[in-house]
């Protein structure tokens, strides 16, 4: 099996852009930007201002993308720059692409009108069907498809090898990295661009997560301090993270510096019965070969119950080891959680601040994952 190395990193979030800004935020352990006004009573961590022209030179391209797509295309460009691949058209033409993200923004005016009318509808089912048939614009739906991010990366940056898109909350990002690592390790592919993006600054996502009871309707508080239940819930953050992954031989042949090594990614999906999450994290930890990493980056959400189980498991597995919740650095980014954690871990290793970093990705509703990033 080939060693899989990280040769490029592209990050944007409330902490700013680039690995240095995010390592500073990781050390601080608190999000750099917090907005408690726009979506009150909910808090969001808005993305830092970006000079989009630096990675998306055409204004026409910028205009046709929504915020989540611009974030992803921008971060993908940063990763290609970091890996020294921006000008290598031949390699980018063969490079495979894996993207983890949700859908785009909804027509919130239509959503609001439907939800309001539903309260007084005599036949809720008939009313809903009629409104969905007559009020939704097909063109709007087509503009929200998640594979458009992969398409825009191909258009703007010329990454035109095979691509695939993953949806499904936190587990999507874990699987994107799992499959990319496995394909390179097995020799199927030499080089891949992997990552995702998320825009939290949207009223529609607030509605969706509030309906599920997952949002924290209070100002920021550290993730592992959001118990009891009255304090629980996640705070969303806008951001994007992309990594260039290569086989060690491929990176060496083109003279690229390997920042870190990504080991096989482990994932699971429990029924979320009491104790199942803790058992899953412990099993995945051992399957990953982790013993005493220098640092743990947790994707814990802050949702009641699940976060406490993960915290208890980490207290047993990583006693005395620094543990940082990613939500305390970037806010919660759903599909981007695993790529963000892996990128920050690679940055710690590349800077010589750690030899081995563990990353956990426990979803707010489903899916568990553990990643291991080591020195080369």
Image (tube, helix red, strand yellow):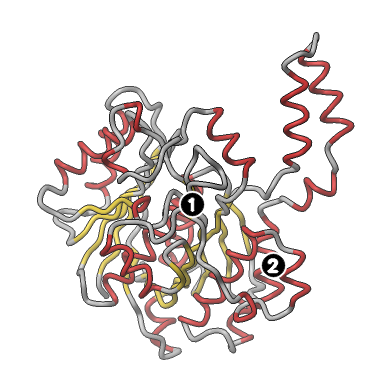
Query: Which SS class for mark 1?
Result: loop
Residue 39 lies in quadrant: top right
Q: Position of residue 203 (x, y in %)?
A: 62, 42
- The quarter holding residue 109 reads top right
- Foreground: 346 or 134? 134
The residue that disc 1 covers is: 35
Q: Are marks 1 and 2 in contact (CB under 8 Å)?
A: no
Q: Quadrant of residue 282?
A: top left
Residue 258 left/right relative to 107: left
Q: Residue furthest top?
A: 122
In the displayed structure, 275 sits above or below 169; it is: above
Looking at the picture, tell me which residue is in the foreground, 199 or 92.
199
For residue 299, above or below residue 258:
above
Relative image position of residue 198 (x, y in whole percent): 55, 54
Residue at 61 percent of width and 68 percent of height: 73
- Badge 2 density bin: few <14, some 14–19, many ≥20, Cα 10 Å: many
SS class, disc 2: helix
**Picture disc at residue 183:** none
Pick whichever of labels 1 and 2 is earlier in the sequence: 1
Q: Going 49% across and 40% down the picture, which residue do you hit?
A: 42
Q: Is residue 129 left or right of residue 86?
A: right
Q: Position of residue 329 (x, y in %)?
A: 36, 57
In the picture of the structure, the residue carrying the numbered disc 2 is: 152
């Amino acid at each position: 099996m080939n060693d899989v190395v990280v040769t490029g990193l592209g990050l944007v979030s409330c902490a700013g852009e680039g690995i240095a800004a995010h390592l500073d935020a990781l050390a601080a352990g608190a999000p750099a930007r917090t907005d408690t006004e726009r979506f009150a009573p909910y808090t969001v961590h808005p993305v830092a201002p970006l000079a989009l022209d630096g990675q998306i030179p055409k204004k026409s391209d910028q205009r046709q993308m929504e915020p989540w797509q611009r974030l992803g295309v921008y971060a993908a460009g940063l990763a290609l720059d970091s890996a020294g691949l921006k000008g290598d058209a031949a390699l980018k033409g063969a490079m495979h692409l894996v993207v983890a993200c949700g859908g785009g923004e909804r027509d919130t005016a239509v959503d609001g009108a439907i939800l309001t009318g539903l309260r007084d509808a005599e036949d809720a089912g008939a009313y809903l069907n009629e409104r969905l048939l007559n009020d939704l614009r097909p063109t709007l739906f087509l503009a929200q498809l998640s594979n458009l991010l992969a398409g825009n990366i191909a258009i703007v940056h010329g990454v035109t090898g095979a691509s695939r898109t993953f949806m499904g909350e936190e587990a999507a990002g874990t699987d994107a990295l799992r499959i990319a690592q496995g394909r390179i390790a097995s020799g199927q592919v030499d080089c891949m661009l992997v990552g995702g993006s998320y825009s939290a600054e949207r009223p529609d996502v607030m509605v969706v997560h509030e309906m599920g009871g997952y949002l924290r309707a209070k100002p920021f508080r550290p993730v592992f301090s959001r118990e009891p239940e009255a304090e629980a819930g996640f705070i969303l953050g806008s951001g994007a993270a992309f990594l260039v992954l290569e086989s060690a031989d491929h990176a060496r042949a083109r003279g690229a510096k390997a920042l870190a090594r990504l080991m096989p990614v482990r994932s699971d999906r429990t029924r979320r019965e009491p104790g199942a999450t803790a058992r899953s994290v412990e099993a995945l930890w051992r399957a990953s070969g982790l013993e005493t990493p220098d640092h743990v980056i947790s994707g814990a959400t802050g949702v009641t119950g699940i976060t406490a189980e993960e915290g208890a498991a980490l207290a047993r597995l990583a006693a005395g080891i620094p543990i940082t919740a990613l939500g305390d650095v970037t806010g919660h980014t759903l599909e981007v959680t695993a790529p963000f954690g892996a990128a920050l871990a690679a940055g710690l290793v590349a800077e010589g601040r750690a030899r081995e970093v563990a990353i956990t990705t426990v979803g707010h509703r489903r899916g568990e994952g553990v990643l291991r990033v080591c020195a080369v």
